[in-house]
Image (spheres, helix red, strand yellow):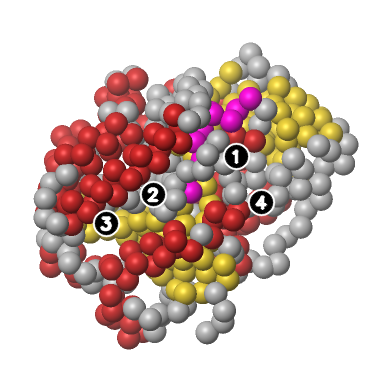
Amino acid sequence: MRAVLTGHSLWLDQLSPLPQRPALNGSLEADVVVVGGGFTGLWTAYYLKQLDPSLSVVVVERHHVGFGASGRNGGWVVAEFACGLDRYAAMSSHDEAFRLVRELHASVGEIGRVIGAEGIECGFHKGGTIRFARNAAQLERQRQEVAHEHAAGFTDDDFRLLSPDQTRSIAAADGVLGGLFFAHTAAVDPGRLVTGLAAACEDAGVIIVERTTVESVGDHVVHTDRGDLRARHIVQAIEAYTRDLDGERRRLLPVYSRMIATEPLTAEQWAEIGLDDRPTFADDRYMVIYGQRTEDGRLAFGGRGIPYLWGSGIDPASEVRSDSHARVDAALFELFPQLRGIGITHRWGGVLAIPRDWTPFVHHDPDRGFLAAGGYVGEGVATANLAGRTMAELITGADTQRVGLPWIKALPRRWEPEPLRWLGVRSSYRLMAAADRIEDRGKTSRLGITLANLLRGS
């Protein structure tokens, strides 16, 4: 087994060497300038060219395509909003919120369609998500969740409860009391998807410039360290890195997650574990974990560790903290103790973005020619597709159901200044970890329920 690659995303490491694109060389004009070479920006560019091939579209990226969360995530194409349906229903109506969620569900299949049409080899497979209930409190929350979703209009084809035997027949996780199956998820190699999508954009005529730092975004202009980009429409699609723009430090909260990847497992090991249909998997602890069986037979697994740095900091050294990664290792081997001693080949981390109200958003200001999207709370692979498609339709004036969805709204209000931001986030995460410990002892944690609801603004 080769040495562990610390700080290297499995997905991007397997692409090495990455395609190299030139930096911006002086000022430029275009119909649309997209800030950010991740999923949101690239999907926007892709659909713009599908809707109107005559448009000139430029994507500007500070590092390389997929540098941020798009190349470091868990590879869950999961059609869920962290805030759930109810928050959007409160902004509009139940029917409108339900329509939004159904559009997100459909985005999983839409991503699969584009992957097939463009010939992108990225291990896309729609196997759903299984969430294990491993204590009585988690089991009761799952029962309540499925009852709530069914009352909202969803069915067993979307969410269904699993018995202990049904759960174990899908995956032999330790200590399972039951489970919940969510149908609208695919597993994917996000590195190959984001770079394949970039290539499809370029084939359609999109210009992508890399190694160009955006300093500020104004009305119809993007100021960079290598010249100004002027356009009729500007799309801001940089998620957690919004904090680097002038005046935007508190717009979205950058929160860290860490991941590991195992060496490829043997056929005998997979026979012990299961996951034959490659469902993504987690359990229902408050401190989120997430995993998938990769196309090449590894486990890619992650979780939240040290969640937030003072001043909305983003620090590469924090992505590889040994104490945080030790927690991820422990969580994986707690789920699958039969894997203790398996080789870990990659350890990495990255930041996701949380808006103050926990609701992912699309923003459109036609007077300024300005659009933005983000705040996906770690569930952005599918959501970015819907956001990008919607922004392309808003720009081109397409008359679709998506341009009236209730997540098209004002920019989220800013987070509190320090030290309130740091104290609030750090304290909340410590209390949620304590809630998990209480539930593992066989008790129900009212503290955890209250905190989860407060964090989601419900």
Residue 65 is marked as 4
Q: Say which residue label 2 marks.
A: 78
What residue does disc 1 label? 241
Crowding near the residue tagged with mark 3, few <14, some 14–19, many ≥20 C-alpha atoms within 10 Å: many
Mark 1 or mark 2, earlier in chain: 2
| Above/below status of 82 relative to 282 | above
Q: Amino acid at mark 4?
A: Val
439 and 168: which one is in front?
Answer: 439
Whether 252 is among the magenta residues is yes
**Quadrant in the rendering for residue 120:** bottom right
Left or right of residue 40, residue 258 in this image: left
Q: Which residues are magenta?
A: 247-256
Comes first in the chain, label 3 or label 4: 4
For badge 1, the amino acid type reads: Tyr
Residue type at numbered disc 3:
Asp
Between disc 2 and disc 3, the foreground one is 3
